[in-house]
Image (tube, grey):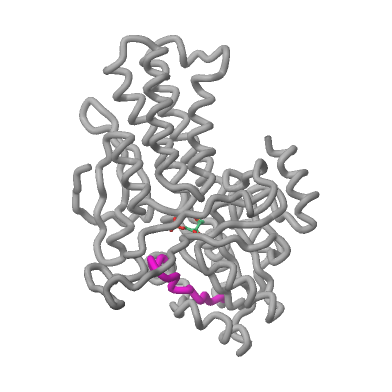
Amino acid sequence: MTAVSHHCARVSPVAWERLGDRYVARLLDQTLLPHQTRWLTIETPEAMADAITRMIVRGAPAIGIAAAYGLALGAQRARGATASVEAMTRALSDDAAHLLAARPTAVNLHWALARLRAVWERPDSQALSSRDALQEALIREAQAIHEDDRIACDAIGAHGATLIPQGARIITHCNAGALATGGRGTALGVIRSAFERDSAITVLADETRPRLQGGKLTAWELRQDGIPVHVIPDGAAASLMRAGRVDVAIVGADRIAANGDTANKIGTYALALAARAHNIPFYVAAPLSTFDFSAQSGAEIPIEERDAREVTHHEHTALFAADTPVLNPAFDVTPGNFIAAFITECGIIRPPYDESLAQLATSAF
Ligand code: MRU
């Protein structure tokens, strides 16, 4: 992985570029935002998997896009290093397994790799005619995944904006914005579309302990668009609701089960509980690539446990006494019955989710 420092006005987490006679992927290093804008050049699937694990790129749809480009990089390598299409697909299967292990909760990672795998597993695949053809087909599919997500974000924004009342004070959690997707964001896509219609809306961004995606990323994105935002400590959300200062809650998702149970950044469930207690509608905005219809409920969703150091340290400074035991689950599951609606590129999905999501599954695939 090599680092290149320069400024880039576009808030987009992943890019695919030609560099001389080869392709590279570029990642905006989200661990350094908002203070530094640094793009990393990624040249192998292993480097991409490492960047996903370290959260240089994060957010469910962006993880899927990054993994797809990671596998396209594997195709570029295998095209030169293998002697047959069969050997190339074996190398690609190993690369896909490596990428899949990078983070467990966001199902978009699995979904994107499955979409690429289908390119070489289709029985009559033209892509199998040569190693060059297979590489080109995988690059095209990765780019299509990226572009599809951009389009999905626009549709999510347009559908979701219809749910936002005039002058709404909206609370959100983590970062479900441009930095987390291939477009203008899911939850932030809705907020952006709502703001285009009504400049009176305002946003409260949970800071989102321990990695602070709300304070570092969401506030940065919204301020660039001139959307009024206050960052709040996560623990302030319930009392601000009680004080009548919140009208709507809207968050993204990492994996949504067939019954509507939704895994998202740790603290999302607490926000949903507080919203329920104060009669505030709680919406989840997500593309179809985030739905896992094979998981019957949230109990089947793997929850990532991350390094205790994320909790015990701020950068290199220890916050707690040495060896203080901590738990650091990175996600939680909000039961479907706390969710007023899902906002997808196909429209607004209402309860009962057992029925409406089953219908979505059959119409979408
Ligand atoms: O650990 P992260 O930063 O990858 O978690 C991100 C979230 O939980 C987002 O809310 C979710 O991925 C939706 S992004 C459109």
**Where 194 falls versus 320 (above or below)?**
above
Q: Residue at x 47, y 54 (%)?
A: 304
**Where 281 falls versus 84 (above or below)?**
below
Q: Is residue 203 magenta?
A: yes
Quarter containing the C terminus = top right
Question: Measured from the top left, where is residue 175 in percent x and y?
Answer: 46, 62
Quarter of the figure with residue 194: bottom right
**Where 224 falls versus 319 (above or below)?**
above
Q: From the viewer's perspective, is 295 left or right of 4? A: right
Q: From the viewer's perspective, is 50 left or right of 232? A: left
Question: Measured from the top left, where is residue 110 in percent x and y?
Answer: 51, 39
Q: From the viewer's perspective, is 22 left or right of 270? A: left
Q: Residue at x 71, y 78 (%)?
A: 279
Quarter of the figure with residue 69: top left
Q: Residue at x 44, y 77 (%)?
A: 231
Along the viewing direction, whichever of 152 and 84 lies nearer the viewer:
84
Q: Is residue 315 visible?
A: yes
Question: Measured from the top left, where is residue 196 in percent x and y?
Answer: 55, 65
Quarter of the figure with residue 186: bottom right
Which range of residues does the magenta coloring cover?
A: 201-213
Question: Measured from the top left, where is residue 357 in percent x and y?
Answer: 73, 48
Q: Is residue 309 magenta?
A: no
Quarter containing the N terminus = top left
Q: Residue at x 39, y 65 (%)?
A: 217
Numbered circles on residues, count: 0
Q: Is residue 197 visible?
A: no
